[in-house]
Each structure stands twice: as C-alpha cells, then as structure tokens.
Image (cartoon, helix red, strand yellow):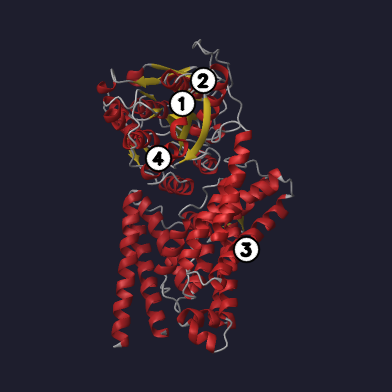
Amino acid sequence: MIRTSLIAAVALSVVTGSAWAQTWTGGDDLPTNPLACDGTAAEAAAKPYDGGVPTNAPDRKGKEITVVDIPKLIGIGYFNATSKGIADAAKELGNVKVKTDGPTKANIDEQITFIDNYITSGVDGILFAANDPVAIAPVLKKALSKGINVVGYDANSTPDARQWFVNQAEFNGIAKSLVDNMAKEIGEDGAFAIVTSTFTTPNQARWIAEMAAYAEKCHPNMKWLETVEAQEDNVLSFNQATTLINKHGDELKGLFGMTSVATPASAEAVTQAGKCGEIAVVGLATPNAMKPYVEKDCVKSVVLWNPVDLGYAAMHVLRAVADGELKPGATSVKAGKLGELQVINGSEILLGAPFTFTKENIGGFDF
Amino acid sequence: MSRYLVRHESILAILLVLALIVLSLQSDRFFTVDNLLNQGRLMAEVGLIALAMTFVIVSAGIDLSVGSILGLVAILLGVFWQNVGLPLPLAMMLGVFVGGLAGLFNGFIITRFRVPPLIATLATLALYRGLAEGISQARSVRGYPEWFFVLGQGEVLGVPTQLWIFLACAVIAAIVLGISTFGRATYASGANAVAARFSGIPVDRTILLIYTASGLISGLAAIIFVSRVSTTRSDMGTGLELDVITAVVLGGTSIFGGRGTIIGTMLGLALMQALKNGLALAGVKGDGTIVVIGLILIATIIISNLLRRESDG
C-alpha cells in the first residue's frame, strides 16, 4: 500500500505540476474565440455545409417516422427536460413516434451500443447528445449509411457523422456569461475553482477553454486555482466541491459548476460548509435544482438555455430534414413555436443567447 | 464435481437457446447474421478479458483492475504513438506489454505481500485509472491511420476481425485451462492453496502468471477498443470489470475458486449479450435490461446450487 500511494503521489504531482504551465485544465486545445468584453456581437463567418448525408434515405415526406432519442445518460433533470421538449414537439407534429433511451451513466461504450441496437431495430431518425465527439462518429456514420436521419443536440459529434446539430448556445457566449457573473460576484481579483464532468467531455472542455480565453482578455486578474473531474455524479460532485473548499480555505472565493449535476452539488457543499455568501457558486444548471439555493441567496446566478426548447428544436430539425425541407446550404429553419432559427458554422442550428436565472426570475421556470 | 459442471452448463445452454427463441420472436431483426456478428464485435473486449478472468476466479482470486488497465493501455497507445512518435505497431506492442506489467504488479503484491486479491486490485483499480488520467493530461488522441481501424471496425472473411481474435484466444484458453498442467495447477490453487503447496504445485508462480495474462489480455482489449471507437480517452473501460465478472460468474465459475470452465464463460457471455441486445430490439429500455440480467444471474446460481445440493445429498 505504501508503494501504491507513493506511486500515486508521484503521478499526481507530475499531473498538477504540468497543468500549471498550461491553460486551465479541463479545456480542450481547439482555437478559442472570446467575445468582446462589452458584449458586441461577433461577426458570423459564412461556412459551407460540412455535415454528413444519409445514403439512399427513403422519401419520408409527411410520413410517420420512428425516432429514438439517445442522450448522454438518462434519469437526470437536464435530459428529462430535453426529452420532454422532444416529446412535446413530436406530439405537436403528430407524425412522429419518439422514444428516449440511453445509458444510466455518461459512458461512451454503452451509448455506442444503444445506438447500434437502434440502428438494427430500424428507426427512421436518431437524435443524440454525444459523450465523445470522435468515439460516437463510427456508429453515427453507420446510421447514415443505412439511410437514417441523424441530428445531434446539446453535445456534438464530428460534423460529417451527423446531418445537423442544434447548438444550445455558442461556447464563447456561455463562457462570457459565466465569467462575467463570477467577476461580478467575487470581484476582479478573486480566486475560483471549477467542477466539471470529465476533462474530455466535449461541451465542458470547450467552455473551459473559452472561459480561460475570455478571462484572460477581459478579467486578467482573476485567479484560476484548479479544475476537478466529478463525472456527472451527484455524490462525487459534492465530495469534490467539499474537498476544494477544505483544500483552498479562504483563498477560494468562487466555484464554477460546469454540469447540471455539479452546480447544485457545489451549492450544497457550500451550504453545508456554512460558507454561503463567502464562496459564490456560478454555473450551468436547471432552475428546479437551484431554486432552494437561489431563494436562500446562496447562489446568485445560474446560467443556461432552456433545455425543453433545445429538445423541441432538435425534434423539429429532424422532422424538417426527414421531410427534405432543411437541405445543405439553408440559412434558417422553422421550429414551431420558436420561429425561425439561424444556421451557423455550416451545419449547426443556433437555439439563441444564454439565459441567466436569478432570484427575480427563477420562479417562472419549471424544469 | 464434473457432474455439477455439466449441469450448470446445460442449464445455461438451455437458457441461452430459450432466450434466443423468445428474443427472435420479439423482434424479427434479432436473429439475423448481420446483427449476431455485430454483437460479436461489441462483446469481443469484455469476452477477451472474461477468458483471463475465468482463470483468475478459478484460482480463488479476483481482478478488479482490468477496466483501469484497459484505460491505461489505451492512453499509453496514444501517447507512445503521438507524443513519443513511435511507429504505431510498436506502440501497440508496447501498450500490451505495459498491460502485462500492470498485471504482473497485481500478481506481485498478491503473492509477495499476501494482500487479498480483492484489496490489491481495488487499489490498483484506482492507481491505474489515476495514472491514465494523469498521463493523458485530459487530452484524447485521435487521427489514427486507416489500417489501424481494421482491428476494431473491419472484417476478415465477413466476420469482425476482433471476433477471430476472441475465438482464437478462447480456444487457447479452453485448452490451457482444460487439459494442461497449468490448468490443473490453477484449479488446485483455487480449490485449496495449502494442499496445492504441499503437493509441490508452484502456487505463487501460477498466480503471478494468471494476473500477468489478465493484464496482457486487458491491454489487447484496449487496442481493439481504441480501434473500434477511433479515439482514446482516460475514462475508457470504467466499470468494465463488473460486466466481465458477471459473465464469468453467470458461466458457473465459483467465486470461491476451484471450479469453472471456459465454455461456461462463453455461454454466460453469449447469454448476457443476447439479453442486452435482444431486449433492446424488443423495445425494453436500458434500465429494464439491467434488471433482467440481474434476475437471471440470481436465478441461474440458485438453480444450479439447488441441483448441486440434490446431487450431493
């Protein structure tokens, strides 16, 4: 055991040591594009369609289609909300049979197996939120090769493995919103830590990279302490947040929760440590999970889009693709009650700007 | 003892046939060559490790670290190839070799320091996963050359490549466990280590070799896994050990050691995969499938225990 812990300690110090030299741990190494500090809108660059195309897809125009929705995992508030939106849209459309199924843990191999089985069972359309953009690509390409319409939402795959992706908010927009709110709460020279799912989860990694870039540009004196992994697991997130609070003591002024599980768990950790008001929690979460903390003034800002709308838009996009209404090169798509949504980045559809839930408005949301 | 083994395996075989019939009645897409071969592809990694795990459990041990070894080797494959710049075939061999070392280390702490296998491999489960996450520095390695995907996504003579590898390994494992001296030594060490020692059987060496093989084969599974999903991540294979152990135990290998066969493991594996796939195709959701597998595991073990008691009494 001594040997074991020695090796572990050495390994750990190697990791943390090298992490300091780089940007924030948990970010990816793709180029970043921080927004202007005052919120001037960025110029959208035109890009040709880079999504995939199903081979020999039958004519599905107006016909009833069977669709399966495979989120990263099932049984958590966030994906319950997206599948509610998907079901709502399917009901409204009237010609879609939809079912949500998926792994109970955010696990790539299980998700791949689920998709594989649904391809075999012969669905017309697949909606997915990827646990890993590259690992999921072969199975999605297989779906396309069988003539199945494939649309992603929430977490993207490599573009050529699906037709369209519904982007809930651009990464730099979320990053700006999170960092601005944190700066407002802990001041320009506060120190903070990040609780994320895993370092390679595509969304979280992208946000962290954009947050690092935006903070460097607009809030250069804020101090990043460390990023910890907590899967998307309640207990683990709580434990990781508690460890951060104990480890960094008074230096720690803020916690970012990067997932809808990590944020309420971090808020709970701060509450139980009796540090409400001393340690700010800013993060992505569903309003229902955050209501108790927001009402107690323990958390001031929760950043998110509306996941019900996200699922709703994804379903409408899939139907439009199946009907042949949304073709490569289109600049917008009609999504029921949401109106016209813009096409960005070649083959993505933008849901809208992120939303900050505060004590004043959170009561009006129920998901 | 041999009568019991035959019985457990017959029960399993009957159950498997029943399951296949019922499941193919539920969905006409289940019993097709395409789907069955595809399932073979999906279960190859778990299957490979289950072969080694059969030896481990027969020797009255357990290896919880296999999923972590898989993750570690996957990451090292990427690091050796992309960061160190080794040619990919060499990186693959080196990766499998490190898997073997990781297994050897397990065997070493178990035999030299007399740490119970459960504790030893629980510790290395955390250790190897930690190393994988540390070494990867949260970056995944992608962009492998096209030929590499033959292993995990390609076919040879119409059958998925990894299924050939799995079947070859299964035949070797069955021969080694069934008729070789090493196989006898494995049973003897598991049934009664003290008696085996006094009979002049090299118990420690046997156990050391078994854990090394378990590490090696986890490394091999890692290479296949990376090839199948075309990327490496440090969280690959998390929780895999539970699937592996379930298949082995379902296959009639006694968790107390001294009993178990490769054929049983193969049947257990096939039954588990058939249920997972068939139930999904029949429209049962993922959570329901896990419940059914749990129930079947309990039921088979109770039935074979009852039958064993009868034949003993």
Q: Classify B192 as above or below A158.
A: below
* Mark carried by residue A242: 4
Say which residue label 2 marks.
A344
Mark-to-mark CA distance, 3 and 4 = 37 Å
Q: Is residue A357 among the parts visible in the rendering?
A: yes
Tell me the kind of residue under disc 2: Ile
**Left or right: B158 with respect to A279?**
right
Q: Chain of mark 2?
A: A
Mark sitting earlier along the chain (4/2): 4
Nearer the camera: disc 3 or disc 2: 3
Q: Chain of mark 1?
A: A
Residues marked 3 and 4, same chain: no
Tell me the kind of residue under disc 1: Asn
Looking at the image, which residue sits at the far front? A250
Q: Quadrant of the C terminus of chain A?
A: top left
Say which residue label 1 marks.
A167
Q: Secondary structure at mark 1?
A: strand
> Residue A104: where, in percent of width, then height?
37, 46
Mark-to-mark CA distance, 3 and 2 = 48 Å
**Left or right: B198 with respect to A309?**
right
Residues marked 2 and 1, same chain: yes
Residue in view at x 57 percent, y 69 percent: B107
Mark sitting earlier along the chain (2/1): 1
Is there CB contact under 8 Å for labels 2 and 1?
yes
Residue in view at x 25 percent, y 21 percent: A364
Tell me the kind of residue under disc 4: Thr
